[in-house]
Amino acid sequence: MQTSGNTILVTGGGSGIGAALAQRWHDAGNTVIVAGRRLEALAAACEGRADMHAIALDATDPAAIDAFADEVVSRFPALNVLVNNAGIMQFEALETRRDLAGAEATITTNLLGPIRLINALVDHLVARGDGAVINMTSGLAFVPLIDTPTYNATKAALHSYTISLREVLAGKVEVIEIAPPAVRTELTPGQSDRAAYMPLDAFADEVMALLAQQPTPAEVLVENVKFLRFAEAEGRFEATLGALTAMARNARHA
C-alpha cells in the first residue's frame, strides 16, 4: 500500500483509533473521508484540514450502506482505500438469560457492517487497480475476554473473513488487517484513563510506521498485541486466557 496520494475512507473516523489514523493519513498527504453516525464528531476530526471530509453513515442499515457507497464513489472517484474501523464493544453476562439486543447490535456493526461495505465497494476497488481494504480486528480475536464475548467473536470472524478476502483478491486489491491491543479510547466507559492500556498516539504512530514498510505487512501488529496474537502458536493460550479471565473477575470486584 502506498503511503501518500491515496483517497482513504475510514469508518468510525470521528473518534478514537479511527480519528487518530485518519488524521495521520491526512498529514501524510492523502485525501481522507471519515464516516460514522455522529456528524459533529466527524466534523471535529476534520476541523482545519483541507481534503478531509465527513459523511454520515449508519453501518447497521444495509440500504444506507449501499446509498453511502454510491455517494462516496460519485463524490470521490479516486477512492482506493477502505478502512473498516467502526465498531462497538459491550459488556455481557452469559450466566443468566438476558436481552440479546446488544449482542445482535454488536454483530451487525462489527461484522455485517464491514462485509456489507466491502461488498458495496469491491467492484470499484478492483477497477481502480491500486485498491486496498484494511479491516480493524482486535487482539481479543485470538484470546477472548470473558466480559465481551460477542465482541471477541465478531473480531475473530472478521479475522477469518479477512484471510479469505485476501486470498480471493490477491493481485487485485491489497487486504490488510490491523489487530489493536487494549488502547486508551472511549470504546468502553473509562477506557481512555486506564494506565495499563496503550496510549492512543503511541498506537497510531506505531501502526503508521508498520504500514510504511515495504511490502506492507498483511497483519499490522504493534508490539503490545503480540502476546495475544501469538499465544496459541507459542503454547501460551491457556495461561494467557487465564490471566485475562482473572483480570476481568478482579475488575468486577474492584
Image: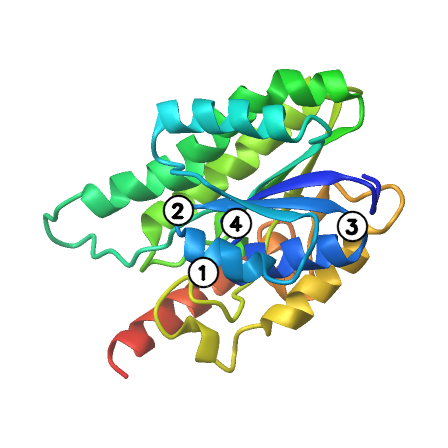
Q: Earlier in the sequence, mark 3 or mark 2?
A: 2
Label 1 sits on residue:
241
Closer-to-camera residue (37/2): 37
Q: Marks 1 and 4, how far apart in space?
A: 10 Å
Q: Marks 3 and 4, how far apart in space?
A: 21 Å
Whole-percent x and y of residue 224? 64, 66
Compared with 252, 172 (above or below) is above
Q: Earlier in the sequence, mark 4 or mark 2?
A: 2
- The answer to whether any part of residue 144 appears in the image is no
Compared with 114, 206 (above or below) is below
Q: Residue furthest right?
A: 214
Mark 3 or 4: the one toward you: 3
Quadrant placement of the C terminus? bottom left
Instruction: Say which residue appears at 30% left-offset and 72% top-offset.
Output: 249
Q: Are marks 3 and 2 in contact (CB under 8 Å)?
A: no
Whole-percent x and y of residue 116? 46, 26
Secondary structure, mark 1, is: helix
Q: Which mark is residue 37?
A: 2
Instruction: Find residue 167 and report its image quarter.
Output: top right
Label 4 sits on residue:
142
Mark 4 or 2: the one toward you: 2
Instruction: Say which residue appears at 68% left-offset and 71% top-offset.
Output: 202
Q: Marks 1 and 3, how far apart in space?
A: 29 Å
Mark 4 Cα shell of 10 Å, populated few (<14), some (14-19), many (≥20): many
Badge 2 amino acid: Arg
Label 3 sits on residue:
211
Badge 4 amino acid: Phe
- Colour mode of the rendering: rainbow
Q: Marks 3 and 2, how far apart in space?
A: 27 Å
